[in-house]
Image: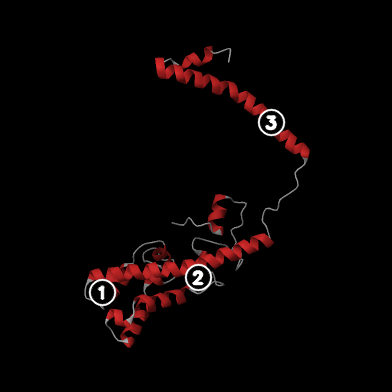
């Protein structure tokens, strides 16, 4: 859902935060951390998942047939990095869209279309789990260590005068907002009991 605290998202929320990847120093974008050249190759994760989920004995196929199946799936549009809007891509797959091309490919090697759908979901879940453990967690650890060595917003000394001025300003603000709040609370009680008109607020002089 593009909501992980990656540099790309943090920069969108606060422009003062750098949108550069701390590993490759390139501009970060949605899911950049997955395909960052310094991370574990996503292709290896996909291959490992294929061998784990689509085992020959589980599929009732030979090893050579399984290897052909792996090659077909790896080269599908839904597992490729491209930016064509008319085709599924690795990005659309990782955002949670179930790719039909994988289901159609698996249906040729399974007893039913339902089995192909189940295997596709198992494959995607396994890929996401490996991405989480092998890419996301190390990426966060590296970023945390890098942030400690090179903080983007180093803590600066604050003078006592600035603290005093801030405190006085807060007290002044509270004193100017206290009376209106009391008036509204008083009117609200009367409105609940007697449906008092809002203009009655202006008659409270003693508060």
- Location of residue 162 with respect to 138 vertically, above or below: above
- Give the answer, above or below, for where 39 lies relative to 57: above
- Give the mark nearer the N terminus: 1 vs 3: 1
Q: What separation in Å lies between label 1 and label 3 (alpha carbons)?
A: 70 Å
Camera-side residue: 87 or 135? 135
Q: Which residue is mark 1?
A: 107
Q: Nearer the viewer, mark 1 or mark 3?
A: 3
Q: Residue furthest left?
A: 111
Label 1 residue SS: helix
Q: Residue at x 56, y 54 (%)?
A: 10
In the rendered image, the vertical position of residue 199 relative to residue 66, given as above or below? above
On the image, the x and y values in percent for residue 36 come to 54, 69
Quadrant of res 174? top right
Question: Label 3: few (<14), some or many (≥20) within 10 Å?
Answer: few
In this rendering, the label closer to the viewer, 1 or 2: 2
Q: Position of residue 86 (x, y in %)?
A: 36, 64
Q: What label does residue 169 carry, if any?
A: 3
Quarter of the image where the C terminus is located: top right
Question: How many numbered circles are shown?
Answer: 3
- Residue sitting nearer the eye, 94 or 131: 131
Give x and y (percent) for residue 23.
60, 67
194 on left or right of 155: left
- Answer with mark 1 or mark 2, whichever residue precedes in sequence: 1
Residue 70 location, quadrant = bottom left
Q: Earlier in the sequence, mark 2 or mark 3?
A: 2
Q: Is residue 4 visible?
A: yes
Mark 2 lies on a secondary structure that is helix
The residue singled out by tag 2 in the image is: 134
Q: Badge 1: few (under 14), some or many (20 or more) residues near its Cα, within 10 Å?
A: some
Q: CA distance from mark 1 to mark 2?
A: 30 Å
User: Nearer the observer, disc 2 or disc 3?
Assistant: 2
Q: Is residue 35 left or right of residue 126?
A: right
């Amino acid at each position: 859902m593009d909501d992980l605290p990656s540099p790309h998202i943090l920069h969108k929320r606060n422009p003062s935060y750098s949108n550069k990847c701390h590993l490759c120093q390139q501009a970060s974008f949605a899911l950049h951390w997955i395909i960052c050249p310094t991370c574990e190759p996503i292709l290896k994760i996909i291959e490992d998942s294929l061998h784990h989920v689509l085992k020959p004995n589980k599929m009732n196929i030979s090893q050579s047939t399984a290897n052909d199946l792996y090659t077909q799936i790896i080269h599908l549009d839904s597992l490729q990095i491209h930016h064509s809007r008319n085709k599924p891509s690795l990005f659309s797959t990782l955002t949670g869209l179930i790719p039909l091309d994988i289901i159609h490919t698996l249906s040729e090697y399974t007893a039913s279309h339902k089995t192909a759908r189940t295997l596709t979901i198992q494959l995607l879940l396994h890929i996401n789990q490996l991405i989480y453990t092998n890419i996301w967690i190390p990426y966060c650890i590296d970023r945390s260590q890098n942030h400690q060595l090179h903080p983007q917003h180093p803590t600066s000394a604050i003078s006592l005068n600035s603290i005093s001025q801030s405190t006085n300003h807060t007290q002044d603000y509270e004193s100017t907002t206290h009376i209106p709040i009391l008036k509204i609370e008083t009117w609200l009680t009367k409105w609940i009991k007697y449906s008092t008109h809002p203009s009655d607020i202006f008659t409270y002089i003693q508060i």
